[in-house]
Image: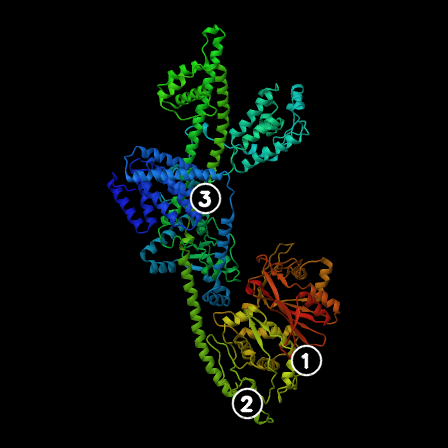
Amino acid sequence: MEFTFMEDDNGDELFDLAKDYFKDGDHIKALEVLEDLSLDQGNDDPVEGIHVNYFQGTIFRELAGDSENNDVKVTYLLASVECYSRNLGLSAFSAGTLFLLAQQIESVLYYKQSVRKAKEGLYKAVSMQEGESVNKEREELMSIIEHAELRIAESKTRVDSPVENCEQQVRESKENGETRKSEPDLFKRLRSYWAGLNVEIKRNFMKVSTAELRSYVEGIYSTGGRDALEQVLTSAKEDRKWRFWFCRTCSVKFSSPEECKSHFEQQHGAEFKPSSAKDITKRISKVWTRKILVGGWDPVDAVAAIQLIKNRLEDVKAFAYENGWSKDWPLAADKERSELLKEIQSLLVSFCDHKILSCSVRDWVMHFLVQHLENLEVSKHILTDCRLVETPQSICFLECGELNQILDFLKNIKCERDDGTDLVCRAVDSFYAGTRVKEKIDFDPQFSFLLLDKRLLQCKIARFDDEGIINVFDHNVHYAKAHAQGDDILSWLFDKSSQDESIPFPTPIRAHNLDIWIAVLRAVQFTCRTLGTKYAKKLQYLDYDAALTGAKNLCISEDVKRKNLHKDHWNSYASLLCKRCKERDAGDSLTTKAFLCVVRDVLKGASYPTLDFPDLEDYLTVIHGSTNLSDELVLKSLDLLKFVVNLLVPLIDSKILLIENSRINLLNGLIRLSVFDYRSYIGQPMKEVMLDRILDMESKVKAAATEEDISLEKEADILFEKEAEEEKKLQSKKKKKKNKSNKVFSANVCLHMSSESSVNLEPGVTSPLLKTAEEDSMEPEDTFSSESGQTSLNTINQEDATKDMENMPGEDSFSEHLEFAHGEAANRYRSALDMTLKALLNIKALEKDLVYNRQPFHGNLEEQVPYALQDFFSAFVSEQITEKGLYNYLLRNIFASLEEIHSMSSDAAGVVVAILEFCHFWKSPERESLVTRLFTLEEYERMSCRKCRRKPNYPEQSSYGIVMAADSIVDLKCALGNIKFEDVLKVIRMEGEMMCDVKTGGCGTTNFVHHTISRCPPIFTIVLEWEKNETEKEISETTNALHWEIDISMLYEGLEPNTNYRLVSMIGCVEEGEFICMAYTKNRWVSLRHETLAEEVVGNWKSVVRFCGERKLRPEILFYEATRSMA
């Protein structure tokens, strides 16, 4: 269809521009121009409006064809139907689109509408000149009618199949599964870098300078981006809100959904109301709804009740009613009536739930009741006095016949309408989701910094911020107490789903979802058009009903006249009605037409009202031929038609309410689509600025680390030379032994970690840090294996290991080598050191940190302990620790270094502390040490005096974990019952009371202490102190009381619930003084012992409890790892 003229030259140019945009595939621009044209010319203009409506309808129909999303496709088709429906000349296009829509959602409703529109198109085509295009159009319309009527007939026997929906769900599930990808390398790298930053740097990172953002935006997007950003910042400063509602047609902003709704209803035809308020269909009140929902609906003994009304009316008036129901009425034990009443209640409740129970339906039911009781000599006036017309309990007075009539009537009311509204709303939700933002963004008082949501420093944000209020804070105060315990800020930076990709910055706001926005507006308008049609039908029936009443009154007035006239002078009812028609045949009002239709239907004996008015001459011919109809048949016909009309009007009201529900849902969807959030608009440039900043920070650290590596390598070379000279002097004083080191260390050995690579030794070359074979002997070859990023020990048979040692002649055992050690204390210390290192190596968070943060130690280069530890961890990370005998050599190196500076009488806790203290050297100027990042608890103790209300501030205290007596755990379990391990820990910590310090003005009262921590470290350590004389049963009970997973939010206030940690390794001691490591690896617990890397499989936690009891193994050190770091 082509239109070649428009009366307005400017409109003609704009129309051509819209066509050019559409040809170029820019439907957004085309719709913008057409929307402007529709505002200027009017949608319903018979000449000008048809151009815009046809073109817009065509665009939406093509968009529907291109869309792969069924919900969006239906939305576009509805919009196309509305555009075509605005002009009678487009009926053929409307019919075709309605048929497509009906096929898309299998809607009988739209099949019927397509038939109706196709018939309109055929009627129009009859008046057109014959031609090829006209004939083709007629054939298409006839085909639509034929196929649509066939589908309507088939629908009466069709059973819907859920297969398609199931396939869609499976397909969506599969697609969602395929989109789950591993984290990008950049994200992993930055997450590791972020974990090492100190708290202040993290807090400062949350500020985004508006000047920096302006500079970035102008550099990327030029002046257009700068102007768009200025518009955002100006709006934020003036309105103090990020969110607003925007009409894409008028380009008007609104501050609330109510304003937006009012605008759509008043300016864009998003509401329909009949001209007279009395004709508006109304729902029943909330009071009546409550009466229907809460009633008992038990059948009343009508005979006994009527006797009460007749004989004891005053008592009946005094009956007590609760929510419209009285227990004073006599009940009847009638099963059949009871079942009918329950069925009626079920239908009424369903109508209430769907908000389609109209006052007219209620009135019809109550009128039916009044008529029934009046037949039993109970007047309406008395029923009103007894309050029976105010309650649905009056329905319970009816007998089975009347109840069945009510039930049959109610079953004609439909609760649902297959108009596709649910699909449109679902499409709206998918677009609306892109505009919602979870993160708050505030400003400093000068509006020079955007302050990102501090919750991103702690955890993921679960709820959306649908208010978008902008607060003003001093950024130093705002972030002062923010816990920086997670890396969710990085997840947010990399998250593409948190931004609305439909409007990339700096696209004009009006273009945001413009196509779907206009489509939903058209869907709302189409629903209002349908409402108008239904109201017009209702008004026709009301006029028809008034005409019936007029005809009946005419007959009644004739009855009055007949009392004073002889029968020969009586006028028949039919002749009176015909006479009145002749008096009105010149009129063209709706009232006149309704009366003419009534007379025709009465004289023809019609059982159903006909509202179409034929040619006047044909009409008069029909009625003149029926003037001999008897009065009895006339009255009977009038009563029948009255009864039918009284049924039809309430049913139409229910349909109107059903359509009104669709209108409300679609309008609410349009309001949601109108939401615009500047946070999603500027979110991407903000993220890009922040990513650039953190990448710049990381690159500076890398550059500094590279320079430091070069310097350290030079210092290490000097140190190597000095050690080599000392080695030669020492070797000359000892007996010469065979050198076996070249055989054992045939592979390259990684010495010191750096950010780039490790220092490798060539075969046959031994580092001065590695003692020669003249001093040391080697353990037979044992290996580590790394699986899925978690280190675990390979199972090695003890006998095989012993056999390997025997097959290595000339090598001394590890225990024989340490003849110089301090007896049992040294052996105990060496065992504790070995088990501590093995326990640490089983912690995934530590392994990840070692891999991502290969920084050398800082501090005194003369101290061997840091370098010995670094050699150990370097070999572990590089997997060179699997080389033959290397583990025991590195362990011996650490032990020899510690022997000189640390007491050999220390227990396992002392060894752990010693290792962690030395690891504090592992840091850089801009990064916290490895220990601070992973192990350190920054704890605050807070006390509020219950007597004097003083709240003294205590300084932050650092620790590696908590210490408690082992026997107190079982004692509390016995005293308090089966409580969780974290509850036991909480009770034990509550016993530590603090006195309100008198010296600082306190009252001296003891109070409970509240514990908080500034961040949750990835590793949480618990130390248990034992009496050393526990029985096997006591050890088993204590171990059993330990839980594999704990929630430390029970120990520290202010943490998110379910801050869970899981036990990954523990160190225990047996009576002989030997330490054993229990490690959880490969989904089961294993036992690791000293002087061997062989592991013994223990099994599940119950097996661990049994193992500890049988071997009298007392768990002393428990290493828990945050579950989020294990993911």
Give amino acid for label 1: Ala
Q: Position of residue 208 (x, y in %)?
A: 42, 59
Residue at the image point whose x is 44% and y is 65% from the top: 694
Give the numbered dot on residue 727: 2
Q: Label 2 to label 3, Cα distance in Å?
A: 88 Å
Mark 1 — residue? Answer: 825
Q: Residue 42 — which label? A: none
Q: Quadrant of the C terminus?
A: bottom right
Side of 316 relative to 259 (left or right): right
How dense is the environment of label 1, judged by Cα within 10 Å: few (below 14), some, or many (20 and up)?
A: some
Answer few, some or many: residues within 10 Å of disc 2's Cα (few below 14, many 20 plus, some between 14 and 19): some
* Three-letter code for the amino acid on which mark 3 is drawn: Ile
Between 764 and 160, the residue placed more toward the observer is: 160
Residue 271 visible? The answer is: no
Residue 865 in the image, given as x and y percentages of width and height: 56, 79
CA distance for labels 2 and 1: 28 Å
Percent x, y of residue 494? 45, 61
Task: Name the residue rendered at 52%, 47% in the picture.
Answer: 162
The disc placed on residue 105 is: 3
Of circles 2 and 3, which is in front?
Answer: 3
Sequence-wise, the earlier of marks 2 and 3 is: 3
Check the picture and name the quadrant holding the N terminus: top left
Q: Position of residue 701 (x, y in %)?
A: 44, 71
